[in-house]
Amino acid sequence: MADFNTIAQQFVEFYYNTFDQDRNKLAALYRENSMLTFETGATLGMSAILEKLTTLQFERVKHQVATLDAQPSNESGGILVLVTGALLVDEEQRPMKYTQIFQLMPDGAGSYFVFNDIFKLIYG
Amino acid sequence: MADFNTIAQQFVEFYYNTFDQDRNKLAALYRENSMLTFETGATLGMSAILEKLTTLQFERVKHQVATLDAQPSNESGGILVLVTGALLVDEEQRPMKYTQIFQLMPDGAGSYFVFNDIFKLIYG
Protein backbone atom coordinates (compact mmCIF):
# COMPACT_ATOMS: atom_id res chain seq x y z
CA MET A 1 0.00 0.00 0.00
CA ALA A 2 1.18 3.51 -0.80
CA ASP A 3 2.51 5.66 2.03
CA PHE A 4 0.47 8.55 3.39
CA ASN A 5 2.44 11.22 1.51
CA THR A 6 1.79 9.53 -1.83
CA ILE A 7 -1.89 9.06 -1.03
CA ALA A 8 -2.17 12.71 0.03
CA GLN A 9 -0.54 13.91 -3.19
CA GLN A 10 -2.75 11.70 -5.35
CA PHE A 11 -5.84 12.80 -3.48
CA VAL A 12 -5.06 16.52 -3.76
CA GLU A 13 -4.33 16.27 -7.47
CA PHE A 14 -7.56 14.35 -8.06
CA TYR A 15 -9.60 16.64 -5.81
CA TYR A 16 -8.64 19.92 -7.48
CA ASN A 17 -8.76 18.50 -11.02
CA THR A 18 -12.29 17.32 -10.28
CA PHE A 19 -13.22 20.60 -8.56
CA ASP A 20 -11.97 22.63 -11.52
CA GLN A 21 -13.58 20.41 -14.18
CA ASP A 22 -16.92 19.28 -12.70
CA ARG A 23 -17.74 19.97 -9.07
CA ASN A 24 -20.69 17.55 -9.16
CA LYS A 25 -18.25 14.66 -9.27
CA LEU A 26 -16.83 15.61 -5.87
CA ALA A 27 -19.86 13.86 -4.36
CA ALA A 28 -18.04 10.53 -4.56
CA LEU A 29 -15.41 11.81 -2.08
CA TYR A 30 -17.81 12.59 0.79
CA ARG A 31 -20.00 10.48 3.09
CA GLU A 32 -23.02 11.16 5.29
CA ASN A 33 -20.77 12.03 8.26
CA SER A 34 -18.38 14.27 6.30
CA MET A 35 -17.94 17.88 7.43
CA LEU A 36 -17.16 20.95 5.33
CA THR A 37 -16.35 24.40 6.65
CA PHE A 38 -16.16 26.71 3.63
CA GLU A 39 -15.10 30.17 4.76
CA THR A 40 -17.65 30.85 7.54
CA GLY A 41 -20.29 28.25 6.69
CA ALA A 42 -20.35 24.78 8.25
CA THR A 43 -22.02 21.90 6.41
CA LEU A 44 -22.60 18.24 7.34
CA GLY A 45 -23.14 15.31 4.98
CA MET A 46 -22.52 14.61 1.32
CA SER A 47 -25.75 16.14 -0.02
CA ALA A 48 -25.36 19.45 1.83
CA ILE A 49 -21.66 19.62 0.97
CA LEU A 50 -22.35 19.04 -2.73
CA GLU A 51 -25.10 21.68 -2.65
CA LYS A 52 -22.61 24.12 -1.13
CA LEU A 53 -19.79 23.35 -3.56
CA THR A 54 -21.95 23.47 -6.69
CA THR A 55 -23.65 26.77 -5.81
CA LEU A 56 -20.50 28.82 -5.18
CA GLN A 57 -20.69 32.13 -7.02
CA PHE A 58 -18.32 31.48 -9.88
CA GLU A 59 -18.49 29.58 -13.13
CA ARG A 60 -14.87 28.70 -13.71
CA VAL A 61 -12.13 28.08 -11.16
CA LYS A 62 -8.53 26.94 -11.28
CA HIS A 63 -6.62 25.82 -8.16
CA GLN A 64 -2.82 26.07 -8.02
CA VAL A 65 -1.24 24.13 -5.15
CA ALA A 66 1.82 25.80 -3.60
CA THR A 67 2.53 23.48 -0.65
CA LEU A 68 1.16 20.12 0.47
CA ASP A 69 1.98 18.43 3.79
CA ALA A 70 0.54 15.27 5.30
CA GLN A 71 0.69 13.31 8.55
CA PRO A 72 -1.01 10.11 9.76
CA SER A 73 -4.01 11.27 11.82
CA ASN A 74 -4.90 8.14 13.80
CA GLU A 75 -4.14 4.43 14.09
CA SER A 76 -6.93 3.49 11.66
CA GLY A 77 -5.14 4.80 8.58
CA GLY A 78 -6.47 8.37 8.59
CA ILE A 79 -4.39 11.03 6.84
CA LEU A 80 -4.30 14.74 7.63
CA VAL A 81 -3.48 17.01 4.68
CA LEU A 82 -2.66 20.74 4.69
CA VAL A 83 -2.65 22.59 1.37
CA THR A 84 -1.72 26.19 0.69
CA GLY A 85 -2.25 27.63 -2.75
CA ALA A 86 -3.95 30.13 -4.98
CA LEU A 87 -7.10 30.11 -7.07
CA LEU A 88 -8.31 32.02 -10.07
CA VAL A 89 -12.04 32.43 -10.66
CA ASP A 90 -13.84 33.43 -13.86
CA GLU A 91 -12.27 36.51 -15.53
CA GLU A 92 -10.32 37.59 -12.46
CA GLN A 93 -6.59 38.01 -13.20
CA ARG A 94 -5.28 38.16 -9.62
CA PRO A 95 -5.12 34.81 -7.83
CA MET A 96 -6.59 34.59 -4.30
CA LYS A 97 -4.52 32.78 -1.72
CA TYR A 98 -6.14 30.00 0.28
CA THR A 99 -5.43 27.26 2.75
CA GLN A 100 -7.37 24.00 2.99
CA ILE A 101 -7.19 20.97 5.22
CA PHE A 102 -8.58 17.51 4.70
CA GLN A 103 -8.74 14.50 6.92
CA LEU A 104 -8.96 11.41 4.73
CA MET A 105 -10.36 8.21 6.23
CA PRO A 106 -10.07 4.70 4.76
CA ASP A 107 -13.45 3.58 3.41
CA GLY A 108 -12.85 -0.09 4.11
CA ALA A 109 -12.81 -0.90 0.39
CA GLY A 110 -9.25 0.15 -0.38
CA SER A 111 -9.98 3.81 -0.97
CA TYR A 112 -10.49 6.97 1.11
CA PHE A 113 -13.20 9.52 1.76
CA VAL A 114 -13.05 13.07 3.10
CA PHE A 115 -14.14 13.17 6.74
CA ASN A 116 -12.98 16.74 7.51
CA ASP A 117 -12.65 19.63 5.04
CA ILE A 118 -11.93 23.23 6.01
CA PHE A 119 -11.32 25.92 3.37
CA LYS A 120 -10.23 29.48 4.11
CA LEU A 121 -9.18 32.35 1.89
CA ILE A 122 -6.09 34.27 3.06
CA TYR A 123 -6.67 38.00 2.80
CA GLY A 124 -4.33 40.96 2.63
CA MET B 1 -17.98 19.34 28.94
CA ALA B 2 -17.19 22.25 26.67
CA ASP B 3 -17.96 21.92 22.99
CA PHE B 4 -15.19 21.49 20.44
CA ASN B 5 -15.24 25.12 19.30
CA THR B 6 -14.72 26.38 22.84
CA ILE B 7 -11.94 23.87 23.47
CA ALA B 8 -10.26 24.84 20.19
CA GLN B 9 -10.41 28.55 21.07
CA GLN B 10 -9.05 27.98 24.57
CA PHE B 11 -6.28 25.76 23.24
CA VAL B 12 -5.20 28.22 20.54
CA GLU B 13 -5.13 31.14 22.98
CA PHE B 14 -3.09 29.10 25.47
CA TYR B 15 -0.77 27.70 22.80
CA TYR B 16 0.27 31.04 21.28
CA ASN B 17 0.49 32.82 24.64
CA THR B 18 2.83 30.06 25.81
CA PHE B 19 4.75 30.06 22.51
CA ASP B 20 5.26 33.82 22.68
CA GLN B 21 6.22 33.87 26.37
CA ASP B 22 8.24 30.69 26.99
CA ARG B 23 8.47 28.04 24.27
CA ASN B 24 9.92 25.51 26.74
CA LYS B 25 6.52 25.23 28.38
CA LEU B 26 4.99 23.89 25.15
CA ALA B 27 6.48 20.49 26.10
CA ALA B 28 3.42 19.78 28.25
CA LEU B 29 1.19 19.84 25.15
CA TYR B 30 2.98 17.05 23.22
CA ARG B 31 3.41 13.29 23.76
CA GLU B 32 5.83 10.68 22.47
CA ASN B 33 3.64 10.00 19.43
CA SER B 34 3.04 13.66 18.55
CA MET B 35 4.06 14.89 15.10
CA LEU B 36 5.25 18.34 14.06
CA THR B 37 5.84 19.52 10.51
CA PHE B 38 7.41 22.98 10.74
CA GLU B 39 7.84 24.42 7.26
CA THR B 40 9.73 21.57 5.53
CA GLY B 41 11.00 19.64 8.55
CA ALA B 42 9.10 16.72 10.08
CA THR B 43 9.64 15.82 13.75
CA LEU B 44 8.26 13.00 15.91
CA GLY B 45 7.90 12.97 19.69
CA MET B 46 7.85 15.56 22.47
CA SER B 47 11.63 15.83 22.93
CA ALA B 48 12.41 16.35 19.26
CA ILE B 49 9.49 18.76 18.86
CA LEU B 50 10.64 20.84 21.84
CA GLU B 51 14.18 20.88 20.47
CA LYS B 52 12.82 22.16 17.16
CA LEU B 53 10.58 24.83 18.69
CA THR B 54 13.18 26.17 21.11
CA THR B 55 15.95 26.45 18.53
CA LEU B 56 14.04 28.49 15.93
CA GLN B 57 16.12 31.44 14.77
CA PHE B 58 14.40 34.26 16.61
CA GLU B 59 14.40 35.59 20.15
CA ARG B 60 11.00 37.20 20.34
CA VAL B 61 7.81 36.28 18.52
CA LYS B 62 4.21 37.43 18.61
CA HIS B 63 1.37 35.48 16.98
CA GLN B 64 -1.81 37.23 15.88
CA VAL B 65 -4.69 34.88 15.06
CA ALA B 66 -6.90 36.03 12.17
CA THR B 67 -9.22 33.02 11.78
CA LEU B 68 -9.83 29.85 13.77
CA ASP B 69 -12.04 26.96 12.67
CA ALA B 70 -12.59 23.58 14.30
CA GLN B 71 -14.31 20.28 13.58
CA PRO B 72 -14.59 16.98 15.47
CA SER B 73 -11.93 14.71 13.96
CA ASN B 74 -13.03 11.25 15.14
CA GLU B 75 -15.45 9.48 17.47
CA SER B 76 -12.95 9.49 20.35
CA GLY B 77 -13.22 13.23 21.01
CA GLY B 78 -10.43 14.43 18.74
CA ILE B 79 -10.62 18.02 17.46
CA LEU B 80 -9.17 19.39 14.24
CA VAL B 81 -8.18 23.07 14.33
CA LEU B 82 -7.19 25.35 11.45
CA VAL B 83 -5.62 28.72 12.27
CA THR B 84 -4.61 31.48 9.87
CA GLY B 85 -2.76 34.48 11.19
CA ALA B 86 0.35 36.60 11.20
CA LEU B 87 3.50 36.65 13.26
CA LEU B 88 6.09 39.26 14.09
CA VAL B 89 9.63 38.19 15.01
CA ASP B 90 12.33 40.22 16.76
CA GLU B 91 12.73 43.72 15.28
CA GLU B 92 10.88 42.94 12.05
CA GLN B 93 8.03 45.39 11.40
CA ARG B 94 6.21 43.46 8.68
CA PRO B 95 4.14 40.53 9.90
CA MET B 96 4.53 37.19 8.10
CA LYS B 97 1.34 35.32 7.28
CA TYR B 98 1.05 31.70 8.34
CA THR B 99 -1.37 28.83 8.57
CA GLN B 100 -1.24 26.10 11.21
CA ILE B 101 -3.29 23.01 11.92
CA PHE B 102 -3.56 20.97 15.08
CA GLN B 103 -5.29 17.74 15.85
CA LEU B 104 -6.04 17.65 19.57
CA MET B 105 -6.63 14.27 21.22
CA PRO B 106 -8.16 13.68 24.66
CA ASP B 107 -5.46 12.55 27.10
CA GLY B 108 -7.85 10.42 29.17
CA ALA B 109 -7.42 12.73 32.17
CA GLY B 110 -9.85 15.46 31.13
CA SER B 111 -7.40 17.42 29.02
CA TYR B 112 -5.97 17.30 25.49
CA PHE B 113 -2.61 16.89 23.82
CA VAL B 114 -1.40 17.81 20.33
CA PHE B 115 -1.23 14.72 18.12
CA ASN B 116 -0.74 16.52 14.78
CA ASP B 117 0.83 19.95 14.23
CA ILE B 118 1.65 21.42 10.80
CA PHE B 119 2.93 24.99 10.45
CA LYS B 120 3.47 26.77 7.13
CA LEU B 121 4.37 30.34 6.26
CA ILE B 122 2.33 31.88 3.43
CA TYR B 123 4.60 33.72 1.01
CA GLY B 124 3.98 36.46 -1.54
Image (cartoon, coloured by chain):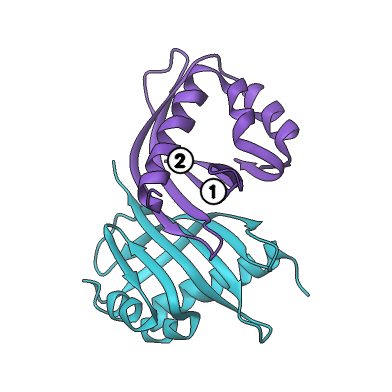
Chain colours: A cyan, B purple
Nearest to viewer (mark 2 / mark 1): 1
Task: Report which residue position mark 1 lands on.
Answer: B104
In front here: A38 or A75? Answer: A75
The answer for which chain carries disc 1 is B
The structure residue drawn at horizontal position 53% and vertical position 66%, both measured from the top left corner, is B75
The structure residue drawn at horizontal position 41% and vertical position 49%, both measured from the top left corner, is B1
Give the position of the N terminus of chain A as an image quadrant: bottom right
Task: Report which residue position mark 2 lands on.
Answer: B123
N-terminal of the pair, mark 2 or mark 1, is 1
Q: Within the image, what quadrant is residue A88 found in?
A: bottom left
Question: In the visual, does A63 lie left or right of B120?
Answer: left
The structure residue drawn at horizontal position 41% and vertical position 69%, both measured from the top left corner, is A35
Give the position of the C terminus of chain A as an image quadrant: top left
**In the rendered structure, which amino acid carries the disc numbered 1?**
Leu
Q: Is residue A4 above or below residue B113?
A: below
In front here: A80 or B80? Answer: B80
**In the rendered structure, which amino acid carries the disc numbered 2?**
Tyr
